[in-house]
Amino acid sequence: MKRGFDLPEPVALPAQRGQTFVKLVELTQRLLAEDGCPWDREQTPHSMRRYVLEEACEVIDAIEDGNPSELKEELGDLALQVVFLAELARKEAGFGPDDVVLSICEKLVRRHPHVFEDQTVEDSTEVLRNWEAIKAEEKAGRRVLDGVPRSLPALARAQRMSDKVSRVGFDWPTKQGSRDKVAEEVAELNEALAGGDRERVEHELGDLLFALVNLARHEQLDAEIALRKASERFRERFAHVEDRVRAVHGGFPRAKDGKPAPGIALSELDGYWNEAKGREK
């Protein structure tokens, strides 16, 4: 006989203390029970990796869209990933959801002595410096960059690495040094391109991208967000190009497989592209 589930009652915003999270744990346990969901019961921490990444990205999209309702839903999906993985770990790794929450609470208290102890700080820069110092004590023997996740998107990982080493003094003393490094890497990339060695071109292109990320950090910009915005601008501009091609030509020519193909003059496409740019101003 199937059993229902008593959903938590809505809680007024001023009274919310996280009390409904208990219900999420209870619901997840029900899904993973012997008479629960077959698909859920087949999952492992390894199989859940893609969902953690997807849900985190959807949270970022909701933040950028500025949609509170969407953000609420996506945060719920992300919270499920945390609880679900903690429940899977109950059998495999010997910890559960309460251990996860206790662990982060202990960490936050340890790393905020300016809040929970008598330490004083002047600004957020000193907070970050102290955070790294405390973290280094906790993880004695670890290298400076060991804590940067390998699974981060490449630009975000590069900026995080650049930021981490800067905190121990490995950095240009001024922004100009970072700008000069970009120019140096451009010259080296041009030299590699002229030589035609693909391996060296890849090497120098990577160095240039890393130098640009470092420049973004010096300018207090997020390289990942900057590129994402550029990609979105490209998408919107090309949508205008496609609309104009459809209006003038009925669409792009089609290849034998039915996919869009070349056939319209680049000068005409550039004209539509410039129209799209002009509309942004």
Image (cartoon, rainbow, N blue to C red):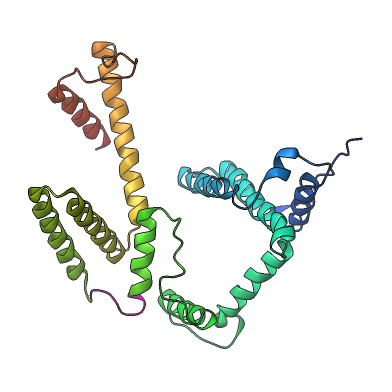
**Viewer-nearest residue: 271 or 55:** 55
Q: Is residue 249 left or right of residue 159?
A: left
Q: Is residue 17 visible?
A: no
Q: Is residue 96 left or right of residue 79?
A: right
Residue at the spot 78% in from the left edge and 51% down from the top edge = 29
Residue 85 appears in which quarter of the rendering?
Answer: bottom right
**Viewer-nearest residue: 71 or 171:** 171
Point out the stretch of residues depicted in magenta: 166-172
Q: Is 2 above or below relative to 14?
A: above
Q: Quadrant of the N terminus?
A: top right
Residue at the spot 49% in from the left edge and 77% down from the top edge = 131
Residue 168 is inside the magenta segment:
yes
Residue 157 appears in which quarter of the rendering?
Answer: bottom left
Percent of width and height locating residue 166? 33, 74
Residue 252 is inside the magenta segment:
no
Q: Quadrant of the C terminus?
A: top left
**Viewer-nearest residue: 150 or 14:** 150
Percent of width and height locating residue 74? 59, 45
Percent of width and height locating residue 77? 62, 46
Q: Is residue 144 visible?
A: yes
Q: Is residue 75 left or right of residue 35?
A: left
Type of secondary structure dominating the magenta stretch: loop
Percent of width and height locating residue 164? 38, 71
**Viewer-nearest residue: 226 or 170:** 170
Numbered circles on residues, count: 0
Task: Tell which residue pokes out farthest to the top in this image.
Answer: 250
Task: Tell which residue pokes out farthest to the right in this image.
Answer: 1
Task: Tell which residue pokes out farthest to the bottom in this image.
Answer: 118
